[in-house]
Image (cartoon, helix red, strand yellow):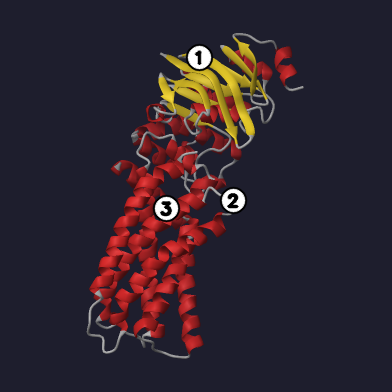
Amino acid sequence: MRALEVEGLARHFGEREALSGVSVSLEMGQTLVVFGPNGAGKTTLLRVLASLLRPHAGDVRVLGSTLPVNAWEVRGRVGLLGHEPLLYRELTARENLMFHARLHGVGASRVSEVLDAVAMSARCQEPLRSLSRGMVQRVAIARAVLHDPQLLLLDEPHSNLDPAAVELVAPLIGAASGRARVICSHDPAGGLAQADRVLGLREGRQVLWGEHASPQQIAELYR
Amino acid sequence: MRRAVGALLRKELLVELRTLESVPAMSLFSLTTFVVFHFALNRTSVEGDLAAGILWVTLLFAAILGINRLFVADADQGGFDGFLLAPVDRTAMLIAKALTLLAYLLVLEIVAVPAFALLLLAGSLGRALPGLVWVLLLADIGIAAIGTLVAALAVRTRARDLLGPLLALPLLVPVVIGGARASSPLFTLPRSGGPAARWLLTLGLYDLIFGLIAFALFDFLLED
């Protein structure tokens, strides 16, 4: 089973084409890094792969299940870390994670485990609104991996994290996690170092695809 | 399903306890409205259709405040996406939200009905209370089903604060009519009769129909 098999994916919002003719594939355990300027369609791609948006054309198979018809098979096997932490500001980190744990049928011990892993146990009883953005991002990472997903969809996962925190979360969302990953990045050096596959998007169109890309090719995407 | 409904309901009540955004506003609105009626009518006691009308119109507008806020935290803080990513039946959200709204309405009525009695029924509900509880419960179920459906529809639009009441009010008019007609005999002096059975039945039927409509449509409202 492949983590991803996408052929000719298109998605539009009204008249605007957010994605058009995107074709990628990814084996289990591999990492696909997506580059592209703001508005290139990276977030839309992640949301389609997470089954939150319907593809309007093309074939999309995630973890062997066809979207959107079998989207229910994908839910619970994918971890999404987007721009929004998907956490409630008035609840504490533990309450937020317990809420998601109940939805995913995960036990309380796993919540403690992931809170320890992101070094948030000491402040897990404080409302999220009182935490720094970096701490909220760490809790969001804990939420994304809480149910031990096979595929991680990460949209600039290190935003708001300091270098120590980046190291801290590496076992959860890094290559060492062993999960298939799709990472949206604006960091050519960091992104290319992790990539087994590289996808470049510009204005919703696939302009770069392959096993390798040079930093110059990535820089070209942003011009 | 039970696990998901429990998780959602617990989260809803925790968020409301922390923010106190809905229930205090609904309660305060109803208290203020009864005070306004008390002085505007310049009467310490009203009865029959007038009493029932004042009670139900006030409860309707107070409910609208809660309906408008029902999905705001989910829409603004990514709660919809978090829920949609979980391997649970989407109906769980409908049930949990409807139960949340029902809980808000019950708390509202615990505050509003004694205030109504104090300000506009010369201080006593007398024998009307047991019958009124049944009318309130049946009407609340209808308001919860319709309110949840309308709130889910409105919250993803830019004009959600406007669209919610615009959609909810016409759909809730039959509940208000049913509630007022059913409870009118309870407020008619001397207070000896029970609620009007025909209108209780109408409320029950309306609850059933809109419960089924909400069940059938809710999944589609969560789709992109």
Q: Mark 3 lies on which chain?
A: B
Same subunit under labels 3 and 1?
Answer: no
> Percent x, y for residue B99?
35, 55
Quadrant housing the N terminus of chain B: top left
* Amino acid at the residue labelled 3: Leu
Q: How far apart are marks 1 and 2 (CA)?
A: 38 Å
State left or right for residue B109 relative to residue B198.
Answer: right
Element under disc 1? strand
Task: Give the residue type that dot 1 points to.
Answer: Leu
User: Disc 1 or disc 2, which is closer to the eye?
Assistant: 2
Q: Mark 1 points at which residue?
A: A26
What secondary structure is found at the residue carrying circle 2? Answer: loop
Tag 3 secondary structure:
helix
Q: Which of marks 3 and 2 is nearer the N terminus?
A: 3
Q: Identify the disc placed on residue A169.
A: none
Q: Quadrant of residue B204?
A: bottom left
Residue on which the image places disc 3 = B149
Image x and y of residue B81, in percent: 48, 38
